[in-house]
Amino acid sequence: MRYWLFLCLLTAPLAAQTIVSYDITAAPGTVNLGPGYPAEPAQLYGGTLPGPVLRATVGDTLRVRLRNQLGTNTILHVHGQPLRLGMDGVPAISRPETAHGQEFTYELDNLAAGTYWFHPHSQQHHQLNGGMYGVLIVDPANPASDPAYDIEQVIVLDDWDPSITGGTFAGHILNGKTSDGQSTISVTAGQKLRLRILNAAARTNYIIALDGHQMTVTHKDGNRVQGVATDAIPIGIGERYDVIIDCTNPGVWSLAASTLQNRLSNVVRGIIRYNGQVGPDPTPTAVPANLSSGALLNYGQLASYLPSAITATPDRTYPIALSVQPGPGGGQWMINGEQWPAITPTVVSYGETIQFNLTTSTPSPTHVHPMHMHGHFVRLMGTAGGTTHAPMMDTVLIRPSGQPGDAWSVQWLADNPGSWLYHCHEMHHMSLGMMTLVDYNGDYDGDSIADDVDNEPTISGPVLMLSDTESQFQIGNSGAIDMQWQPNEIVSCFMSVFEFAVPVAMPPYGDLRIDSSAMAFLGLVSLDSAGNGQLPYTLPNTPPLIGLRIFLQGVGSSTALGTPRLSLHQAFVVR
């Protein structure tokens, strides 16, 4: 208790910062996919398909409060952003899932500019396939660092599986609609149209093209590249491409997508109409020449807009060999002969340059592997960028064995300590084992918890976490607050019904988050020799408490650090 009073006396004004906040509810719902499918069941963020577009600027702190009303656990992963581990949204690695009826606030700082997306990384793999995804746009701090454009449009491709949703439509959608349900994108002759294209599908890799126009690729996975003009773009699951279109060909045009395996069949299309044009919409099944036979972008054409060096002497080089062993239940999908979770983590040290050599022995046309790296960008080798301007990305599409693009090498800087997933983003392949870990050795934050088991390896304060068991938050029931920090130390835990709208920075102690004017002491957590401990509690069986939002924060003594540390805070809702 004396530490808490000491810290309150030292409270200092917070340095100026911009906090951008969003509230999102994850819940079942229905969506209108277009004519004939007016009420298809789905699982949604914010009740829409796609979910909301979140927007922030480099330098902002993005605060996303996720409320879970799904009826089951969930967790949110911001795909592509190199966030700290605790905000990466992977159960059992970064933190527990969020139970039904509960909430978690993701605080995302050090944001990278570009187009990103968010989706569940839950053990309930069907949630993404059921419609839970949204878009994050991070604008650069200096707008002049982006290419010039007049208008922009987000384009989200997805495959829709009625066996997952319980509905009737089976096929492909663009921005949550079938081809028959599309809203027209209106442009004016002479404008520059920026499309932010995302593949949010569970199992389909696409090719996308615009009839009557070339597209100039300006960004891959959020990272700016030197402009490449092309007719059509292959886009793997999880990939994003930003393109600029010069609107110099008035008419009504089809923005059409095929599968990667068959360019001759249009599976979904949008409509771009120049203002003043009165012609009919292109038919839903028409296949533009750009889609069927136009020049197809390949990775080899890409070069980073800014310097992005690779090295001839990486500190460590690892093979990433992708394979499948046919068998019951879909077979075994493996990395280096190992099937998740029985894997051997790849070990790295902070500051090292790591090289992955990706190969595949899976020859089927459908055996395409969009390999996604959590927490880091990778630099693709062997492209037009050479050794000085290698394109940066987070997802690399590996084609079937024997096809061009069936092997790539990447390098990446080990600059984000923790334990990170590396996996194929094709949902079937991932759920059947094509997933592994990258583990950092060492103790970056000096809290005596090894980086590969530390839930927040870059924050030296205690880590407070809540259970993913729904019953622990119901009146009359018991639960426990989990705490991780320095072995054999003690953390005092406090509660309040109020939090500060802006955290109060108190270096080196941490950020004070709960309002000390309305605070109560809950108890002490004694940490074991591994740095883990729990504070049991029992909620009063008092119905008026239902709906009360309670904020928790701890303060720990520290012999090793010489000063106390404030924990991260978290809220729960009494049920």
Image: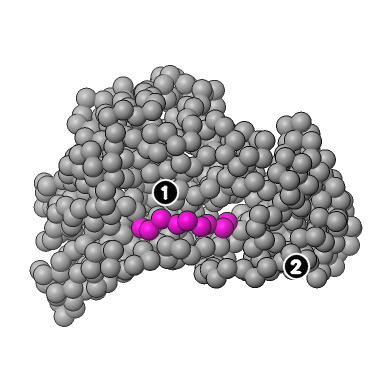
Q: Residues within 10 Å of mark 2 (few under 14, many from 20)?
A: some
Q: Where is the C terminus found, in terms of image quarters? A: bottom right
Closest to the observer: 406 or 465?
A: 465
Q: How many marks?
A: 2
Where is residue 431? Give x, y as percent: 49, 34
At 61% across and 47% down in the image, what residue appears?
A: 459
Q: Residue at x 20, y 29 (%)?
A: 403
Q: Which residue is mark 2?
A: 515
Q: Position of residue 552 (x, y in %)?
A: 75, 57
Which residue is the extreme one toward the right? 541
Lateral position of residue 48 relative to residue 574, left or right: left
Q: Secondary structure at mark 1?
A: loop
Three-letter amino acid code of the residue under disc 2: Asp
The question of residue 108 being in magenta is answered with yes
Q: Earlier in the sequence, mark 2 or mark 1?
A: 1
Disc 1 designates what residue? 80
Residue beneath the point at 32% across and 52% down: 223
The residue lying toward the viewer, choosing from 99 and 216, is 216
| Residue that extends furthest to the bottom in the rendered view of this protein | 276
Q: Is any atom of residue 387 visible in this view?
A: yes
The amino acid type, in three-letter code, at marker 1 is: Gly
